[in-house]
Image (cartoon, rainbow, N blue to C red):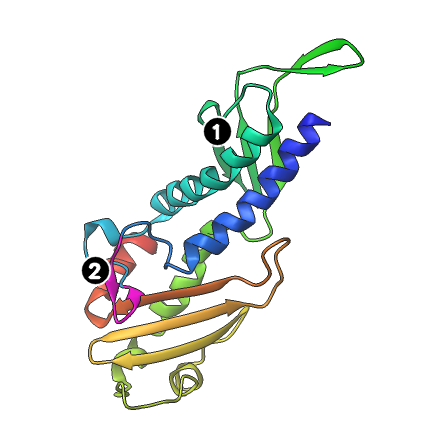
């Protein structure tokens, strides 16, 4: 039962972590511009798969540790290591916990494997859609007076698994995207981030 609750806590925590992380563009530092995190604007706002994984795990730990505290058993988030394989999050530790049932003590290692409703590394694929449309995005001269978030979306052919809203303000592109799928416990995932038109070289270096 304890191990079942650990897996349930990991499932909830992974979805909450994704929800928290991508409303801020996948970064943990303050990179604000125009109300969005301007990713790739400075060193602490650069993303690649390793940084994205570490940022996800930090957010995951904020939620997971609270559940572990409630479950008891003497184990905490800092005893765990994590990896993502395919669409599974694996948590593993060498620490045993004691579970008492009907006066008998059971000792086991509470490792877990959970299916990710949204793999946080897939955010890279979303950003690649932006890179693939660089020429179109560079050529469209909309500005902050244009109150139609669908114009750039339609002109540059955004779509796929997301509903996009895009504005262009001077040299910045402001992106809002919502995933089509409902994630357990948190609903749909919203992505908000900004990119400077001058940052496409950095995007390609880190994401392609």
Q: Residue furthest top?
A: 104
SS at badge 2:
loop
Query: Residue 34 vs residue 15: left or right?
Result: left
Q: Which residue is mark 2?
A: 41
Residue positioned 35% across, 65% down in the render: 193
Instruction: Identify which residue is drawn at 62% across, 53% down.
Output: 185
Q: Which residue is mark 1?
A: 77
Q: Residue at x 70, y 32 (%)?
A: 4
Q: From the viewer's side, name the closer residue of 2 and 157.
A: 2
Does residue 114 sit above or below 17 in this rendering? above
**Looking at the picture, how far across and down is residue 13, in whole percent?**
55, 43
Viewer-closest of 27 and 120: 27
Is residue 70 rendered to the left or right of residue 205?
right
Q: Measured from the top left, where is residue 7 in percent x and y?
A: 64, 35
What residue span does the magenta drawing correspond to? Answer: 30-37
Please state which of residues 24 and 82 is positioned toward the viewer in this rendering.
24
Residue 141 relative to residue 61: left or right:
left
């Amino acid at each position: 039962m304890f191990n079942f609750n650990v897996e349930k806590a990991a499932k909830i925590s992974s979805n909450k972590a994704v929800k928290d992380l991508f409303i801020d563009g996948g970064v943990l530092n303050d990179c604000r511009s125009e109300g969005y995190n301007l990713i790739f604007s400075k060193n602490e706002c650069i993303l690649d798969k390793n940084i994205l994984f570490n940022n996800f795990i930090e957010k995951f730990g904020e939620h997971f540790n609270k559940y572990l505290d409630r479950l008891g058993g003497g184990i905490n988030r800092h005893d765990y290591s994590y990896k993502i394989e395919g669409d599974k999050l694996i948590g593993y530790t060498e620490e045993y916990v004691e579970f008492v049932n009907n006066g008998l003590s059971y000792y086991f290692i509470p490792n877990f494997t959970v299916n990710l409703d949204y793999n946080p590394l897939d955010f890279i694929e979303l950003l690649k859609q932006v890179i693939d449309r660089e020429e179109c995005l560079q050529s469209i001269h909309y500005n902050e007076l244009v109150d139609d978030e669908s114009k750039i979306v339609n002109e540059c052919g955004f779509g796929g698994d997301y509903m996009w809203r895009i504005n262009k303000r001077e040299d910045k592109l402001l992106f809002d995207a919502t995933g089509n799928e409902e994630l357990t416990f948190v609903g749909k995932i919203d992505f908000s981030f900004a990119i400077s038109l001058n940052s496409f070289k950095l995007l390609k270096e880190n994401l392609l």
